[in-house]
Amino acid sequence: MLDFHHTWPYERVANDIYFEECPFCHESPVLIPIKKEAVENAFEGIRTHIVMPCCHEKIVVASMDQDYVWATRVLR
Ligand SMILES: [Zn+2]
């Protein structure tokens, strides 16, 4: 079961996804390299992954909602 510790908030500006702060290296803000289709799939619960451009940490995204990325690993 994923709980709140697996979430990280994001901001959407047009089709770009940003993290206000990287959960790993605390760079801010970070433009997330994720395709629009992958975001749409994540909203359907189809897994995708993100490699953070700042520190190259990998996040396996289990799903996304309007406010949060839900990762398979603990982010906080
Ligand atoms: Zn980082």
Image (cartoon, rainbow, N blue to C red):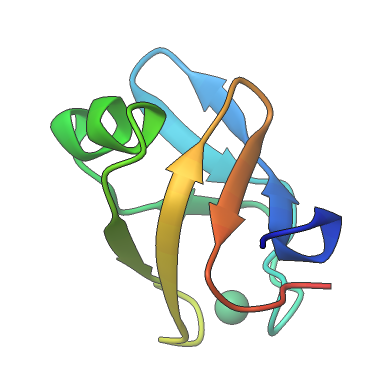
Residue 49 at x, y percent in the picture: 31, 64
Residue 39 at x, y percent in the picture: 31, 33
Quadrant assignment, res 37:
top left
Quadrant assignment, res 7:
bottom right
Quadrant assignment, res 21:
bottom right
Above or below, 51 relative to 45: below
43 or 37, nearer to the observer: 43
Above or below, 4 relative to 68: below
Quadrant of the frame with the C terminus: bottom right
Above or below, 47 relative to 71: above
Q: How many marks?
A: 0
Residue 50 at x, y percent in the picture: 35, 65
For the point 68% across and 27% down, the residue is 67
Answer left or right for 4 relative to 72.
Answer: right
24 or 42, nearer to the observer: 42
Quadrant of the rendered image holding ligand 1 = bottom right
For the point 73% across and 47% down, the residue is 20
71 or 30, nearer to the observer: 71
Residue farthest front in this picture: 1
For the point 71% across and 63% down, the residue is 6
For the point 66% across and 52% down, the residue is 29
Quadrant of the frame with the N terminus: bottom right
74 or 2, nearer to the observer: 2
